[in-house]
Structure formats: C-alpha cells, structure tokens
Amino acid sequence: MLKKPTILFAALAASVSLAACSTTTSASSDMGSTSTAGSSTPAPSPTPTPSPTPAPVMVGGAEMSPSMNIVENASKASNLTTLVSLVKAAGLVETLSGPGPFTVFAPTDAAFSRLPPGTVDTLEKPENMAALKKILTYHVVSGSYTTDQLKQMINQGGGTATLNTVEGGPLTLSLTNGNVTLTDTSGNKAYVSPTEQNVTQSNGMVQVINGVLVPKLSASASGSATGQ
C-alpha cells in the first residue's frame, strides 16, 4: 500500500525536475537569442569633429572678407588708401568690382611714397588718366593666383615665370629668399608681403606688394605722369 504513493511522489518529483530543466534551457536559449540580436545592432557613428575656422586675413589692420570684391576690401585697408584713390581717379572701380577673376598686386601707401615727390598728385590729374590706367592695370592679371601657384610656375620655369598683365605688358616672377618677386620691364622690383598675401576676394585675389611697378610708357605719357 505504501509503495504506490512513494512511486507517485517519485514520478512527480522527476516531472518537476524535468520541467525545471526545460525552463532553464528555454531561458538560456532566449538569453542567447537576445544576446545575438543585440550584437547585430550597429554602433552609433562617432560625432564628427568640426573643422577649425581659418583665421581671417588682415590687411592694414582690417579684416578682409572673401565675400567682398577687390575694391570693397581694399577700401577697408589703412595701408592701401593711395591705391584706392588712384583706382577711383582712373575710373577703374567698376572694372575691379566686376566678376573677374583678377589677381591684383597691390602697392602699399609706403610703396607710393617712395616715388619721386609729386608723382601721385600728378597721376591723379585728369589729363594723365591714360598713363594712370596703364600703371594700375600693369598690376592686374586675369585669373586668381595664390603664392603657391606662382611659386610652382617659377619652379617649372627654372627660376622665372612671366605673367601677362591686363595692361598688356609682362611681369617677370622669381623668388628672393622664398618670397615671390615681381620685376617690371625697367628692372624695378617689388616683393609680395609675407604677411599680407593670398587675400581671397569674391572676384579674385590680392597680393600686397612693397613697390610700384611701371610698364613701358610713351615719352609723352612718361613725361606728363612725372610732371615733366
């Protein structure tokens, strides 16, 4: 009589034990399935580091804006006042405000001050506009050139390169102690400023220089320009 309950309890215990094993196996299987699903979820992309904002280019103590044109930017520079005055006198504001692109080799006020006394005043006179235009457009070339591009041209030319100006005459390029040097048809030299170069404009590029370059002028134009 006692054997049947004993056998029954033993069978029940075995059944519970099997159920527990089944539950553990199922739970393990579910965890494994969850773990596998989790490992397939792509990791978030790293947040990109913003590029540093380049420092603004300063000319004559003023910040140059690449969204402004050559005349607008030059008008803000305290060391280009003579150039801007002459550009206005020559009627070249509209041209140098146009789409371009142009590269302007811009002489500083100090560069103009080294010309013979009275030269700038003489050039601003209406009767000398033709000579003034020739001198100013001799400092302008079509296209936008950085100093790296100019240096590449010089190196490819074996030490020199030539740029044809808007005036029509050539400028000879070379390097002096690593700085771009410009030589006019008379042998006068001007050097691109190491600190005021590659000034991007909406219509080209400005390279500030420390000298005034002079193209070939007719005898009458040369005499009137110098007040002789």
Image (cartoon, helix red, strand yellow):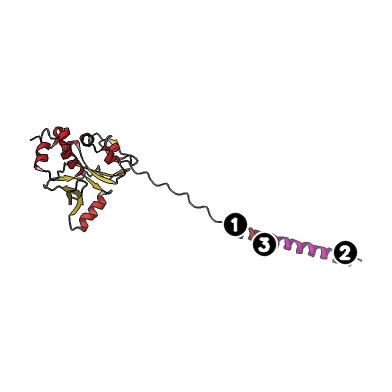
Label 2 vs label 3: CA separation? 36 Å
> Which quadrant holds residue 53?
top left
Q: Quadrant of the C terminus?
A: top left
Q: Quadrant of the N terminus?
A: bottom right
Q: Which mark is residue 29?
A: 3
The secondary structure that dominates the magenta segment is: helix
Tell me the residue at 35%/41% (across/down): 67
Binning the other alpha carbons within 10 Å of mark 3 as few (below 14), some (14 to 19) or many (20 upward) gives: few
Indicate left or right for 217 with 197 as reference: left
User: Front-most of 168 and 206?
Assistant: 168
Circle 3 sits in a helix, a strand or a loop, which is it? helix
Q: Is residue 97 visible?
A: yes
Magenta stretch: residue 38 in it? no
Furthest toward the left, the residue is 228
Circle 2 sits in a helix, a strand or a loop, which is it? helix
First reached walking from the N terminus: tag 1 or tag 2:
2
Q: Amino acid at mark 2?
A: Pro
> Which quadrant holds residue 93?
top left
Asked if residue 62 is positioned above or below residue 3 in the image, the reply reads above
Q: Amino acid at mark 3?
A: Ser
Q: Is residue 124 visible?
A: no
Indicate left or right for 196 with 25 as reference: left
Tell me the residue at 52%/52% (across/down): 44
Furthest toward the right, the residue is 1
Binning the other alpha carbons within 10 Å of mark 2 as few (below 14), some (14 to 19) or many (20 upward) gives: few
Magenta stretch: residue 9 in it? yes
Which contiguous range is marked in magenta? 1-29
Q: Which mark is residue 38?
A: 1
User: Front-most of 147 and 135?
Assistant: 135
Asked if residue 17 is positioned above or below residue 166 in the image, the reply reads below
Q: Which mark is residue 5?
A: 2
Asked if residue 56 is positioned above or below residue 6 in the image, the reply reads above
